[in-house]
Image (tube, helix red, strand yellow):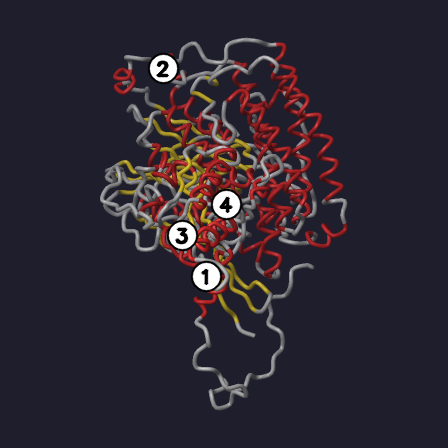
Amino acid sequence: MGRLSAAKPVLTTPAAAPTAEDSPLPMATEPAVPFIEIETLRAREFLPAAKEALGSLLSEQAQGKLIRPMFNWAGRNSLFPLHWGLACCAIEFAAAFGARWDAERFGVVPRSSPRQCDLLIVNGTVTWKVAHKLITLYEQMPEPKWVIAMGNCATGGGPFRTAYSVVPGVDKLVPVDVYIAGCPPRPEALLDGILRLEQLIKERKE
Amino acid sequence: MSEMWINMGPQHPMTHGLWNLRVKIDGEIVLDVDPEMGYLHRGIEKISEDRHYNEIITLMDRTCYVAGIAWEHLFILAAEQALHVEPPERALWIRMLSEEFQRVASHLMWYAAFVQDIGLMSPFLYGMRDRDLVLDLFQSYTGGRLTYEYMRVGGVRNDLPPGFAEQARKVCDWLLDRFVEYDRLCSGSDIFHRRCDDLGVVKAQDCIRLGITGPMLRSAGVPRDLRKDRPYAAYDRVDFDVATAETADVTGRYVVRMEELRQSVRIIRQALDWLDKNPGPVMADNVPRWMGAPYAPVGREGYLLKREYPKGVGFSAIEEPHGEALAYVVNEGGEHPYRVKLKSPVFVNLSAARHYLVGYRVADIPPIMGSVDICVGEVDR
Amino acid sequence: MEGEELSRRLVGKFPAVVVEPFRETAGRVRFPPEILLDLFREMRDGLGFDHLGQVGAIDWVEEREVFYTLWSDREKQYVFLSTRVPASAPHLESLTPVFSSANWHEREAWELVGIEFDHHPDLRPLLTPTGYEFHPLLRSFQLHEPEGLEVKVRDV
């Protein structure tokens, strides 16, 4: 597994780029379901689909008592935060998933792809250079989604509030559900914030 | 096949922080790289020009968040020169003890992160478990887990609490046993060697030409360590060896850091013995109380603001867990420093990325960058 | 290497150089900007200071100072070098032909303090966002409380 030669492998001369006529498989002009819809299908379509399925079995009132609480119960017990370390708080974020605190027992499992996440934990200082990347990541997450501003920097700029390069609080960029104070917050504080978010999700109506 | 540039970052499991590695690839082979930094640029050097000296210590913790107390130490050494203050001897030993504990915590954090990069899961849990024990010790005498605000111009904020030495010795014994387990898990495993041997090689000559310092340089066989070569604090009065390796690859860096963990424990034990025998003050006498105190005296805040410090410059260099860190503090007689320049070892190690990434495969990038031990906070500052 | 010896070995070749004692290092070498490359070649090849520690810059309003730190493994010592360029024309020759590791240091000094390094291979902003127009570490750049930003509220 040593250093490989950067020289290109020998290739035959490539033919001219294939045109649409040459292509053996005809390309569909449009996918049957738009891509973005597939991403959000499960979450967004769950309630109407469940209502439709249960509509013949249950009364209107019973549906309201059953479906929404079940949806919230499932959502709040499997929060998937985005695996993203910004600054100091990311170290405490990692410690919360270490052996002592073990945040995974609350169903919180960090994922590396925003497409799999429903929780954005902003664990550190947000600079203007990273601001649009953060918004992109937030927009890539499927609905419903939540944001935790972890630590003073994400809450209001922290000790770097006056700096020329720092966003004074991530709520200037994306809506925030739970703020956690501390510089950095201890892992217990992060767990408390996650539990409070679960409480918020539990009380969620529509 | 065709060449293309891809972005690894700023959100990527490999980065361990907020930066973007732009990679030019041809199939699986890396042809060129271009690290893109600045996503965590918080303007610490500029804010420092707007703060009192003791307020800057707060920023130093956050400059490098895995080695906060080492950066406090770096800044305090330069600030004491600039302000003409001599700390008492006991404070020097406590600082050295703190820095070594920080080295252990930082290397354990590196271990936990690095082994995840090469695909092992359980060492992450072991590394974090043992790191938390060290952070408990920090918490018992500084009050913080990551950001301590412990050192002061002229000494340290408070002495060690009673019973600290016994607890610290217990942790040292525990850690030394665990290091054997770490080796059994990683470097004793054939899988580890197949993954890491001959990866990311930078030979000694190239290291010096590129300015690389720290475990990367020592893994190339250069026994360079500022704790030995240019002793500060009380490093000239403790016995320890400089860990080196010959292979100059990812395995070599692992071996060096593991040996440094053992040497740090060795230094910590000597420092604990010395501190047991030599009680004394931890703040210099000639420092005004408000300057060393953790708080400004009630009713004297105006006095604090109007204070003029003497003119001076300070230059310090320490062997931070990642390598050689430099600080240059210029004081022009105001209440704030005129300029604070910090040089991070990771900044230089990362600027040489082209020399240890080009020619390897894309899948080799995570172990190589993991072995460099990146802390973006101190690169971007 | 003591300060006197450094002074003796340098001043013979470069009469314009001033060596003064400085903070537990081999000395502080003040030099005019024109001899930069020759001086650093001599420091590296002749005196053995082969490891570039840092390049930084200070804004002294009228002029700007650029300082360098070199380390010698043989002498186990640092040496501190500094030069000044006028703030009206902050041009300095790039050190990259002698020490290639000066690359990122100079990019940083350029964007933060506004020193323009001539013949630098790749003088792009390193830390600040693309399109950022200020040199934040200049004394004329003032920090202030953020203002005029809107908080986003989630519709419930």
Pointer 4 indicates a residue of which chain? B
Q: Residues within 10 Å of mark 2 (few under 14, many from 20)?
A: some
* C-alpha span from label 1 to label 3: 35 Å
Please identify, in this view, whether the residue under mark 1 or under mark 3 is nearer the observer. 1
Residue B35: x and y in percent read 48, 54
* C-alpha span from label 2 to label 4: 37 Å
Q: Residues within 10 Å of mark 1 (few under 14, many from 20)?
A: some
Q: What amino acid type is highlighted by mark number 4? A: Val
Instruction: Name which quarter of the figure residue A181 lies in.
Output: top left
Query: Do marks 3 and 4 share a chain?
Result: no
Relative to A173, is B62 on the left or the right?
right
Residue B288's place in the image compared with B143, above or below, is above
Residue designated by label 4: B348
Residue C38: x and y in percent read 43, 46
Question: Tag 3 or tag 1, which sits nearer the N-term?
Answer: 1
Q: Residue at x 45, y 16 (%)?
A: B86
* C-alpha span from label 3 to label 4: 27 Å
* C-alpha span from label 1 to label 4: 60 Å
Please identify, in this view, whether the residue under mark 2 or under mark 4 is nearer the observer. 2
Instruction: Name which quarter of the figure residue A150 lies in.
Output: top left
Residue designated by label 3: A134
Q: Residues within 10 Å of mark 4 (few under 14, many from 20)?
A: many
Q: What amino acid type is highlighted by mark number 2? A: Trp
Q: Residue at x 59, y 65 (%)?
A: B29
Q: Which mark is residue A51?
A: 1
* C-alpha span from label 2 to label 1: 68 Å
* C-alpha span from label 2 to label 3: 42 Å
Contact, CB < 8 Å: mark 1 with mark 3?
no
Q: What amino acid type is highlighted by mark number 1? A: Lys
Q: Residue at x 57, y 29 (%)?
A: B135
Residue B48's place in the image compared with A134, above or below, is above
Contact, CB < 8 Å: mark 1 with mark 4?
no
